[in-house]
Image (cartoon, rainbow, N blue to C red):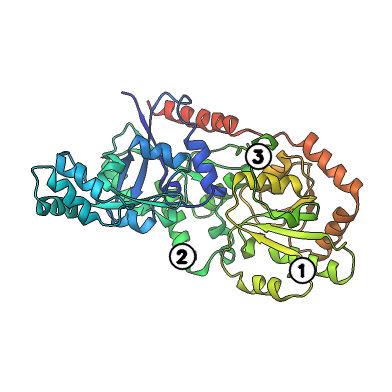
Amino acid sequence: MIMTLYFDLTTTLCWGGPPVGITRVEREIAKRAHGRTHAKIAYCFYQATSGSFYEMAPWLAEAVLSGACHLNRDDLLAADFARRTDRTEISKIVQQTAERSHPDARALALAHANVTNLTLEDILKARDSLSVIPVYWGDDRRPTPSFELVTKKIKPTSDTWIINGGLDWEHKDIRSIRIAKDKNPFKYVAIIYDIIPLLYPHYVVPSYVDVLKRYFGELLWTADYALCISDTTMNDVQTHMNEWRMPELEMDSWPLGCDILPETAHETSLSPRLTGSKYLLYVSTIEPRKSHRTIVDAFDHLIRSDQLSEDALCVFVGRTGWNIDNLLQEIRTNPSLRDRIITLSDVSDDDLVALYQGARFVVFPSRYEGYGLSLVEAMGLGKACLSSNTGSLREVGGDAPLYIPPHDVAAWSEAIRDFMNNDDIVSEYEERSINRYKPITWDRSADLFYERLNAKMAKQK
């Protein structure tokens, strides 16, 4: 019997911004599944309120993978995805009356009633009986009957494989999935990015610590196979499981891709202020683990000691995370920093490429990473890079970056000063990125991912 491989897109389905980090990985690997495995490919999402996986309608999967649309998580949890089989004239009319663009849905329903054999009461009653969920196409909100989003509720069998690759602690009840596996022994594949909540819980939002510990505990018991994004992550997982005497979990690692290349940039909307300026760039969510504080303190010291030219800037690109309000307030009110540090979020891929290209150099002082995708992007674009020496960053960066301990503000100050003021040093490390780092495309990353998965699936036949 042919196996069915479902790629779970719950995270991407509920993600409204540009793909970054985990959402980029989920999207890039999922959309390359076709042609890389002999299994039947389909896409699904998980609804925690019903404890069920639903196969996504092809049009929705295609739109979500392209980034064209998304759902609100709360709407997803509240929706009734029961498949409608009575596709009568009423359901068609009801869908039209739900369109968000019409100023008076009741008047539209009345207009339809006037040209059909249905009464207005029948139409409105049918409309109200439907579960309608808003689908967001950019800024366009389109209420859509829930049954149009799914093909079916999935009833897993022993030939069913489901890949879990997203921010699942926000979307899933892993214990319920494990119980479901006991009843119907399908295969559950986990993509593991890191286990920071288990290793460094102080780097996690306090209210999430217990949630994430339970999540990873359940996940490692539930998964039949795991694919880790680095050897560092895989070794961390193995060490943790050994310490807690957990059952053996078969794992492999594979490298992530990087397709943010110069030729992909088109129109941009960058601030003219950045044009012609010397700026260092840090692309990352702004949160304590990422050590933006180190860069801020180093930059402040250099400005106050008059070691940087007036056109030297610092650019942070990323969404605002937790426990960072004091740092942002300091940046806004510090006379030395408020006009020299620029924060940006939700930038397009084109703008991101332009930011990388315009940067004098790129920094990545994170205290721990399971991979370090923005470091890979910077090296792939031939930029000079300064990186911390923790987690997977040495594994990923190889000999290309200059490595500095993440807490050593003095060392970061010295390096930033040298890279801002010395063209020869910048050129040397640009050459390192070009010659010592060989980018892996997302196509190649997907090849390696599905090679490992296919080998595992072949053992189960």
* Residue 3 x %, y %: 35, 28
Between disc 1 and disc 3, whose residue precedes? Answer: 3
Q: Nearer the viewer, residue 330 or 135?
A: 135
Q: Nearer the viewer, mark 2 or mark 3?
A: 3
Judge the density around disc 3: few (<14), some (14-19), many (≥20) Cα neighbours within 10 Å.
some
Q: Quadrant of residue 431?
A: top right
Q: Which residue is mark 2?
A: 210
Could you give the CA–CA distance between mark 2 and mark 1, rounded to whole angstroms?
32 Å
Q: Earlier in the sequence, mark 2 or mark 3?
A: 2
Amino acid type of the residue tagged 1 in the rendering: Asp
Q: Which three-letter amino acid code belongs to the residue tagged 2?
A: Asp
**Which residue: 85% across, 66% down?**
302
Relative horizontal placement of residue 440, taking residue 210 as reference (left or right): right
As drawn, 343 above or below 30: below
Distance between the Cα atoms at labels 1 and 3? Answer: 33 Å
Residue at left offset 22%, top offset 51%: 108
Depth order, front residue of 360/380: 360
Q: Which residue is mark 3?
A: 265
Image: 91 above or below 73: above
